[in-house]
Image: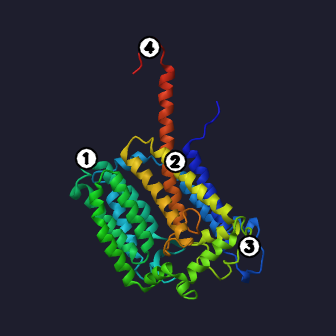
Amino acid sequence: MPVMLRAGHGLILLVIALLGFGVVMVTSAGLSVEQGTTINPVDVLQGRSAILALLAVAALLIGMWVPVQWLHRAGGPLSPIPWMVLVMIGLLIAVHIPGIGKEVNGARRWIEIGPISFQPSELAKWGLLIVIAWHCARRVGSMNRFFTGFAPPMILVGVICALIATEDLGTAVLIGAVSVALLVAGGARVGHALLLLPIGVVGFMAAVIASPYRAARLQAFLGPFDDPQGIGYHVIQSMAAVAGGGLPGRGLGASVQKFGYLPEDTTDFLFAIICEELGIVGACVVVGLYVCLLLCGLSIIKRVDHPFGRLLGLGVVLTIGLQAFINMAVVTGIAPTKGIALPLLSSGGTGWIVTAFFVGLLVSMDRQQAKQQREIEAVTFQCKPTTACT
Protein backbone atom coordinates (compact mmCIF):
# COMPACT_ATOMS: atom_id res chain seq x y z
CA MET A 1 0.00 0.00 0.00
CA PRO A 2 1.46 3.39 -0.95
CA VAL A 3 2.21 5.75 1.92
CA MET A 4 -0.01 8.82 1.76
CA LEU A 5 1.49 12.13 2.85
CA ARG A 6 -0.59 13.85 5.51
CA ALA A 7 -0.74 17.52 6.46
CA GLY A 8 1.60 16.76 9.37
CA HIS A 9 4.23 15.44 6.97
CA GLY A 10 3.83 18.63 4.97
CA LEU A 11 4.46 20.72 8.09
CA ILE A 12 7.67 18.84 8.85
CA LEU A 13 8.98 19.35 5.31
CA LEU A 14 7.98 23.03 5.29
CA VAL A 15 9.68 23.77 8.62
CA ILE A 16 12.88 22.06 7.45
CA ALA A 17 12.69 23.98 4.15
CA LEU A 18 12.24 27.33 5.93
CA LEU A 19 15.06 26.62 8.38
CA GLY A 20 17.39 25.47 5.60
CA PHE A 21 16.54 28.52 3.52
CA GLY A 22 17.05 30.67 6.61
CA VAL A 23 20.51 29.23 7.29
CA VAL A 24 21.64 29.99 3.73
CA MET A 25 20.18 33.50 3.62
CA VAL A 26 21.32 34.50 7.13
CA THR A 27 24.86 33.37 6.21
CA SER A 28 24.69 35.33 2.97
CA ALA A 29 23.32 38.45 4.66
CA GLY A 30 26.01 38.22 7.34
CA LEU A 31 28.90 38.49 4.87
CA SER A 32 31.01 41.63 5.08
CA VAL A 33 33.75 43.21 3.00
CA GLU A 34 36.16 43.17 5.94
CA GLN A 35 36.20 39.39 6.06
CA GLY A 36 38.16 39.20 2.84
CA THR A 37 37.57 35.47 2.55
CA THR A 38 35.24 33.26 0.57
CA ILE A 39 32.63 31.03 2.19
CA ASN A 40 31.92 27.41 1.31
CA PRO A 41 29.18 24.89 2.21
CA VAL A 42 31.26 23.49 5.07
CA ASP A 43 31.42 26.93 6.69
CA VAL A 44 27.65 27.24 6.38
CA LEU A 45 27.01 23.83 7.96
CA GLN A 46 29.38 24.57 10.83
CA GLY A 47 28.02 28.04 11.53
CA ARG A 48 25.86 29.21 14.41
CA SER A 49 22.73 29.34 12.27
CA ALA A 50 23.10 25.70 11.19
CA ILE A 51 23.49 24.57 14.80
CA LEU A 52 20.41 26.53 15.84
CA ALA A 53 18.48 25.06 12.91
CA LEU A 54 19.38 21.55 14.08
CA LEU A 55 18.19 22.43 17.59
CA ALA A 56 14.94 23.73 16.07
CA VAL A 57 14.46 20.46 14.16
CA ALA A 58 15.05 18.58 17.42
CA ALA A 59 12.40 20.77 19.09
CA LEU A 60 10.03 19.98 16.21
CA LEU A 61 10.56 16.25 16.76
CA ILE A 62 10.00 16.60 20.50
CA GLY A 63 6.77 18.52 19.91
CA MET A 64 5.57 15.75 17.59
CA TRP A 65 5.60 13.28 20.48
CA VAL A 66 3.93 15.49 23.10
CA PRO A 67 0.32 14.31 23.67
CA VAL A 68 -1.58 17.59 23.35
CA GLN A 69 -4.50 16.18 25.37
CA TRP A 70 -2.24 16.06 28.43
CA LEU A 71 -2.05 19.84 28.41
CA HIS A 72 -5.83 20.03 28.06
CA ARG A 73 -6.37 17.81 31.09
CA ALA A 74 -3.93 19.76 33.26
CA GLY A 75 -5.92 20.90 36.27
CA GLY A 76 -6.26 20.72 40.02
CA PRO A 77 -3.69 21.78 42.62
CA LEU A 78 -0.82 20.25 40.61
CA SER A 79 -1.72 22.00 37.36
CA PRO A 80 1.34 23.38 35.53
CA ILE A 81 -0.66 26.28 34.07
CA PRO A 82 -0.33 28.68 37.07
CA TRP A 83 3.38 27.87 37.28
CA MET A 84 3.73 28.58 33.59
CA VAL A 85 2.14 31.99 34.09
CA LEU A 86 4.42 32.81 37.02
CA VAL A 87 7.52 31.76 35.08
CA MET A 88 6.53 33.90 32.06
CA ILE A 89 5.96 36.99 34.20
CA GLY A 90 9.09 36.35 36.27
CA LEU A 91 11.30 36.05 33.18
CA LEU A 92 9.85 39.23 31.67
CA ILE A 93 10.70 41.08 34.88
CA ALA A 94 14.15 39.48 35.08
CA VAL A 95 15.29 41.13 31.82
CA HIS A 96 15.50 44.41 33.76
CA ILE A 97 17.69 42.96 36.54
CA PRO A 98 21.37 43.91 36.14
CA GLY A 99 23.55 40.86 35.70
CA ILE A 100 20.68 38.79 34.30
CA GLY A 101 19.12 40.96 31.62
CA LYS A 102 21.21 41.61 28.53
CA GLU A 103 21.02 44.86 26.59
CA VAL A 104 21.44 44.74 22.80
CA ASN A 105 21.09 47.85 20.61
CA GLY A 106 19.64 49.79 23.52
CA ALA A 107 16.87 47.27 24.28
CA ARG A 108 16.66 44.79 27.13
CA ARG A 109 14.95 41.77 25.58
CA TRP A 110 17.37 38.99 26.48
CA ILE A 111 18.33 36.99 29.56
CA GLU A 112 21.90 35.72 29.66
CA ILE A 113 22.91 32.93 32.01
CA GLY A 114 26.45 31.79 31.29
CA PRO A 115 26.67 30.76 27.64
CA ILE A 116 22.88 30.59 27.28
CA SER A 117 20.95 33.61 25.99
CA PHE A 118 17.24 33.70 25.18
CA GLN A 119 14.28 36.07 24.77
CA PRO A 120 11.56 35.74 27.44
CA SER A 121 9.11 37.55 25.14
CA GLU A 122 9.28 34.60 22.73
CA LEU A 123 8.46 32.16 25.53
CA ALA A 124 5.58 34.36 26.69
CA LYS A 125 4.25 34.78 23.14
CA TRP A 126 3.90 31.03 22.68
CA GLY A 127 3.15 30.10 26.29
CA LEU A 128 0.10 32.37 26.31
CA LEU A 129 -1.42 30.23 23.54
CA ILE A 130 -1.51 27.25 25.89
CA VAL A 131 -2.93 29.29 28.77
CA ILE A 132 -5.70 30.89 26.68
CA ALA A 133 -6.65 27.64 24.95
CA TRP A 134 -6.75 25.88 28.33
CA HIS A 135 -8.97 28.59 29.83
CA CYS A 136 -11.39 28.60 26.90
CA ALA A 137 -11.66 24.81 26.86
CA ARG A 138 -12.49 24.72 30.58
CA ARG A 139 -14.95 27.64 30.35
CA VAL A 140 -16.84 26.61 27.24
CA GLY A 141 -20.20 27.39 28.80
CA SER A 142 -19.23 30.76 30.26
CA MET A 143 -16.88 32.31 27.71
CA ASN A 144 -19.66 34.68 26.64
CA ARG A 145 -19.64 36.20 30.11
CA PHE A 146 -17.33 39.12 30.73
CA PHE A 147 -16.13 38.51 34.31
CA THR A 148 -15.75 34.73 34.21
CA GLY A 149 -14.90 34.14 30.55
CA PHE A 150 -13.28 37.12 28.87
CA ALA A 151 -11.77 39.23 31.65
CA PRO A 152 -9.42 36.77 33.47
CA PRO A 153 -7.25 35.85 30.46
CA MET A 154 -7.31 39.43 29.15
CA ILE A 155 -5.96 40.74 32.45
CA LEU A 156 -3.06 38.31 32.11
CA VAL A 157 -2.55 39.29 28.46
CA GLY A 158 -2.58 42.97 29.46
CA VAL A 159 0.07 42.44 32.15
CA ILE A 160 2.36 40.47 29.82
CA CYS A 161 1.89 42.91 26.92
CA ALA A 162 2.65 45.84 29.22
CA LEU A 163 5.89 44.19 30.39
CA ILE A 164 6.94 43.43 26.80
CA ALA A 165 5.87 46.80 25.36
CA THR A 166 8.46 48.65 27.44
CA GLU A 167 11.14 47.19 25.16
CA ASP A 168 9.31 45.62 22.20
CA LEU A 169 6.03 47.24 21.19
CA GLY A 170 5.71 45.20 17.98
CA THR A 171 5.73 41.85 19.78
CA ALA A 172 3.26 43.20 22.36
CA VAL A 173 0.85 44.22 19.58
CA LEU A 174 1.24 40.78 17.95
CA ILE A 175 0.53 38.98 21.23
CA GLY A 176 -2.48 41.16 22.00
CA ALA A 177 -4.01 40.69 18.54
CA VAL A 178 -3.61 36.90 18.54
CA SER A 179 -4.91 36.62 22.12
CA VAL A 180 -8.08 38.58 21.38
CA ALA A 181 -8.68 36.53 18.21
CA LEU A 182 -8.30 33.29 20.18
CA LEU A 183 -10.71 34.43 22.89
CA VAL A 184 -13.33 35.36 20.30
CA ALA A 185 -12.81 32.01 18.55
CA GLY A 186 -13.16 30.34 21.95
CA GLY A 187 -16.61 31.81 22.53
CA ALA A 188 -16.05 35.33 23.89
CA ARG A 189 -18.34 38.05 22.59
CA VAL A 190 -17.06 40.35 19.88
CA GLY A 191 -18.56 43.26 21.83
CA HIS A 192 -16.32 42.48 24.80
CA ALA A 193 -13.29 42.47 22.50
CA LEU A 194 -14.29 45.80 20.99
CA LEU A 195 -14.28 47.32 24.49
CA LEU A 196 -10.51 46.92 24.40
CA LEU A 197 -10.12 49.07 21.29
CA PRO A 198 -10.04 52.47 23.08
CA ILE A 199 -7.69 51.05 25.72
CA GLY A 200 -5.41 49.69 23.03
CA VAL A 201 -5.33 52.96 21.11
CA VAL A 202 -4.54 54.96 24.26
CA GLY A 203 -1.85 52.47 25.28
CA PHE A 204 -0.27 52.57 21.83
CA MET A 205 -0.25 56.37 21.77
CA ALA A 206 1.24 56.48 25.28
CA ALA A 207 3.99 54.04 24.24
CA VAL A 208 4.81 56.15 21.17
CA ILE A 209 4.81 59.45 23.09
CA ALA A 210 6.94 58.00 25.91
CA SER A 211 9.64 56.79 23.48
CA PRO A 212 11.08 59.30 21.00
CA TYR A 213 12.45 56.53 18.76
CA ARG A 214 8.93 55.12 18.29
CA ALA A 215 7.63 58.53 17.31
CA ALA A 216 10.54 58.80 14.86
CA ARG A 217 9.63 55.42 13.33
CA LEU A 218 6.05 56.55 12.84
CA GLN A 219 7.26 59.78 11.26
CA ALA A 220 9.63 57.82 9.00
CA PHE A 221 6.74 55.64 7.86
CA LEU A 222 4.61 58.67 6.96
CA GLY A 223 7.41 60.48 5.13
CA PRO A 224 10.71 58.57 4.81
CA PHE A 225 12.13 60.93 2.18
CA ASP A 226 11.65 63.98 4.41
CA ASP A 227 14.82 62.96 6.23
CA PRO A 228 16.59 60.37 4.02
CA GLN A 229 19.86 60.45 5.99
CA GLY A 230 18.13 60.41 9.38
CA ILE A 231 14.91 58.77 10.49
CA GLY A 232 14.00 57.70 6.96
CA TYR A 233 17.32 55.98 6.24
CA HIS A 234 16.34 52.47 7.38
CA VAL A 235 13.08 52.37 5.44
CA ILE A 236 14.67 53.78 2.28
CA GLN A 237 17.54 51.26 2.35
CA SER A 238 15.05 48.42 2.82
CA MET A 239 12.94 49.53 -0.13
CA ALA A 240 16.11 49.99 -2.20
CA ALA A 241 17.08 46.39 -1.49
CA VAL A 242 13.62 45.11 -2.43
CA ALA A 243 13.55 47.14 -5.65
CA GLY A 244 17.17 46.34 -6.54
CA GLY A 245 16.46 42.64 -6.98
CA GLY A 246 13.95 43.00 -9.78
CA LEU A 247 12.50 39.75 -11.13
CA PRO A 248 15.52 37.38 -11.06
CA GLY A 249 17.55 39.08 -8.30
CA ARG A 250 21.23 39.98 -8.23
CA GLY A 251 22.20 36.41 -7.37
CA LEU A 252 22.83 34.56 -4.11
CA GLY A 253 25.48 36.41 -2.12
CA ALA A 254 25.48 39.39 -4.51
CA SER A 255 23.50 41.84 -2.38
CA VAL A 256 24.83 45.38 -2.21
CA GLN A 257 22.69 46.69 0.63
CA LYS A 258 24.02 44.18 3.17
CA PHE A 259 27.50 45.74 3.00
CA GLY A 260 26.94 48.45 5.58
CA TYR A 261 23.84 50.07 4.09
CA LEU A 262 20.87 48.13 5.50
CA PRO A 263 20.83 47.67 9.30
CA GLU A 264 19.50 44.43 10.87
CA ASP A 265 19.92 42.62 7.55
CA THR A 266 20.15 39.15 9.13
CA THR A 267 17.19 39.60 11.50
CA ASP A 268 14.21 41.91 11.03
CA PHE A 269 15.12 42.90 7.44
CA LEU A 270 16.29 39.56 6.05
CA PHE A 271 13.34 39.52 3.65
CA ALA A 272 14.79 42.63 1.96
CA ILE A 273 18.05 40.75 1.28
CA ILE A 274 16.07 37.78 -0.05
CA CYS A 275 14.27 40.12 -2.45
CA GLU A 276 17.54 41.73 -3.55
CA GLU A 277 19.48 38.52 -4.10
CA LEU A 278 16.70 36.21 -5.33
CA GLY A 279 14.28 38.77 -6.75
CA ILE A 280 10.52 38.46 -7.00
CA VAL A 281 10.97 34.73 -7.60
CA GLY A 282 12.65 34.28 -4.21
CA ALA A 283 10.06 36.44 -2.49
CA CYS A 284 7.26 34.34 -4.00
CA VAL A 285 8.96 31.17 -2.82
CA VAL A 286 9.06 32.52 0.75
CA VAL A 287 5.42 33.61 0.62
CA GLY A 288 4.47 30.25 -0.89
CA LEU A 289 6.19 28.32 1.91
CA TYR A 290 4.28 30.30 4.54
CA VAL A 291 0.97 29.90 2.71
CA CYS A 292 1.48 26.13 2.44
CA LEU A 293 2.41 25.95 6.14
CA LEU A 294 -0.76 27.83 7.11
CA LEU A 295 -2.93 25.66 4.86
CA CYS A 296 -1.47 22.46 6.32
CA GLY A 297 -2.05 23.81 9.82
CA LEU A 298 -5.66 24.73 9.07
CA SER A 299 -6.23 21.31 7.51
CA ILE A 300 -5.20 19.70 10.79
CA ILE A 301 -7.16 22.10 12.98
CA LYS A 302 -10.50 21.52 11.26
CA ARG A 303 -10.27 17.79 12.04
CA VAL A 304 -9.41 18.17 15.73
CA ASP A 305 -12.34 17.07 17.88
CA HIS A 306 -11.60 18.91 21.14
CA PRO A 307 -11.69 22.69 21.74
CA PHE A 308 -8.27 22.91 23.40
CA GLY A 309 -6.47 21.42 20.41
CA ARG A 310 -8.42 23.52 17.92
CA LEU A 311 -7.68 26.75 19.76
CA LEU A 312 -4.02 25.92 20.36
CA GLY A 313 -3.58 25.01 16.69
CA LEU A 314 -5.38 28.16 15.60
CA GLY A 315 -3.08 30.19 17.85
CA VAL A 316 0.01 28.65 16.24
CA VAL A 317 -1.28 29.35 12.74
CA LEU A 318 -2.35 32.92 13.59
CA THR A 319 0.96 33.73 15.28
CA ILE A 320 3.11 32.50 12.40
CA GLY A 321 0.87 34.02 9.72
CA LEU A 322 0.45 37.42 11.37
CA GLN A 323 4.12 37.65 12.32
CA ALA A 324 5.22 36.87 8.76
CA PHE A 325 2.74 39.39 7.35
CA ILE A 326 3.88 42.16 9.72
CA ASN A 327 7.54 41.54 8.92
CA MET A 328 6.98 41.67 5.16
CA ALA A 329 4.80 44.76 5.52
CA VAL A 330 7.55 46.53 7.47
CA VAL A 331 10.29 45.52 5.02
CA THR A 332 8.31 46.77 2.02
CA GLY A 333 7.35 50.04 3.72
CA ILE A 334 3.66 49.20 4.14
CA ALA A 335 3.86 49.38 7.96
CA PRO A 336 6.03 51.30 10.45
CA THR A 337 9.28 49.67 11.50
CA LYS A 338 8.88 47.11 14.31
CA GLY A 339 11.18 44.54 15.86
CA ILE A 340 9.33 41.58 14.34
CA ALA A 341 11.40 38.78 12.80
CA LEU A 342 10.41 36.50 9.94
CA PRO A 343 9.43 33.21 11.66
CA LEU A 344 11.78 30.28 11.02
CA LEU A 345 13.81 32.42 8.60
CA SER A 346 15.31 35.50 10.25
CA SER A 347 18.37 34.84 12.41
CA GLY A 348 17.29 33.70 15.81
CA GLY A 349 17.74 31.14 18.53
CA THR A 350 14.76 31.25 20.87
CA GLY A 351 12.38 32.12 18.04
CA TRP A 352 13.41 29.23 15.79
CA ILE A 353 13.39 26.62 18.57
CA VAL A 354 10.10 27.56 20.23
CA THR A 355 8.28 28.12 16.93
CA ALA A 356 9.41 24.71 15.66
CA PHE A 357 8.27 23.06 18.90
CA PHE A 358 4.77 24.51 18.60
CA VAL A 359 4.53 23.47 14.95
CA GLY A 360 5.49 20.04 16.28
CA LEU A 361 2.40 20.14 18.50
CA LEU A 362 0.32 20.58 15.34
CA VAL A 363 2.05 17.52 13.88
CA SER A 364 1.25 15.66 17.11
CA MET A 365 -2.45 16.43 16.59
CA ASP A 366 -2.20 15.10 13.05
CA ARG A 367 -0.54 11.91 14.30
CA GLN A 368 -3.33 11.43 16.85
CA GLN A 369 -5.95 11.88 14.14
CA ALA A 370 -4.20 9.32 11.93
CA LYS A 371 -4.04 6.86 14.83
CA GLN A 372 -7.76 7.24 15.53
CA GLN A 373 -8.53 6.79 11.83
CA ARG A 374 -6.48 3.58 11.70
CA GLU A 375 -8.33 2.23 14.75
CA ILE A 376 -11.69 2.97 13.14
CA GLU A 377 -10.61 1.32 9.89
CA ALA A 378 -9.35 -1.73 11.80
CA VAL A 379 -12.69 -2.15 13.58
CA THR A 380 -14.58 -1.67 10.31
CA PHE A 381 -12.39 -4.25 8.55
CA GLN A 382 -13.00 -6.83 11.26
CA CYS A 383 -16.77 -6.44 11.02
CA LYS A 384 -18.58 -8.96 8.87
CA PRO A 385 -21.98 -8.50 7.25
CA THR A 386 -23.49 -11.03 9.68
CA THR A 387 -21.88 -9.49 12.74
CA ALA A 388 -23.25 -6.51 14.63
CA CYS A 389 -20.37 -4.15 15.35
CA THR A 390 -20.55 -1.57 18.05
Which label's residue is closer to the chain start, 4 or 2? 2
Give the distance between the C-alpha atoms of the residues marked 1 and 3, in whole angstroms.
58 Å
Give the distance between the C-alpha atoms of the residues marked 2 and 3, in whole angstroms.
37 Å
Q: Residue at x 60, y 76 (%)?
A: 238
Give the distance between the C-alpha atoms of the residues marked 1 and 2, in whole angstroms.
29 Å
Q: Residue at x 50, y 44 (%)?
A: 299
Which label's residue is closer to the chain start, 1 or 2? 1
Q: Is residue 333 visible?
A: yes
Q: Position of residue 62 (x, y in %)?
A: 52, 52
Closer to us: 104 or 199: 199
Closer to us: 183 or 58: 183
Which label's residue is closer to the chain start, 4 or 1? 1
Q: Give the residue number, with chain letter if any, for mark 2.
A: 363
Which label's residue is closer to the chain start, 2 or 3? 3
Q: Position of residue 241 (x, y in %)?
A: 65, 74
Q: Position of residue 354 (x, y in %)?
A: 50, 61
Q: Give the residue number, with chain letter if any, for mark 3.
A: 254
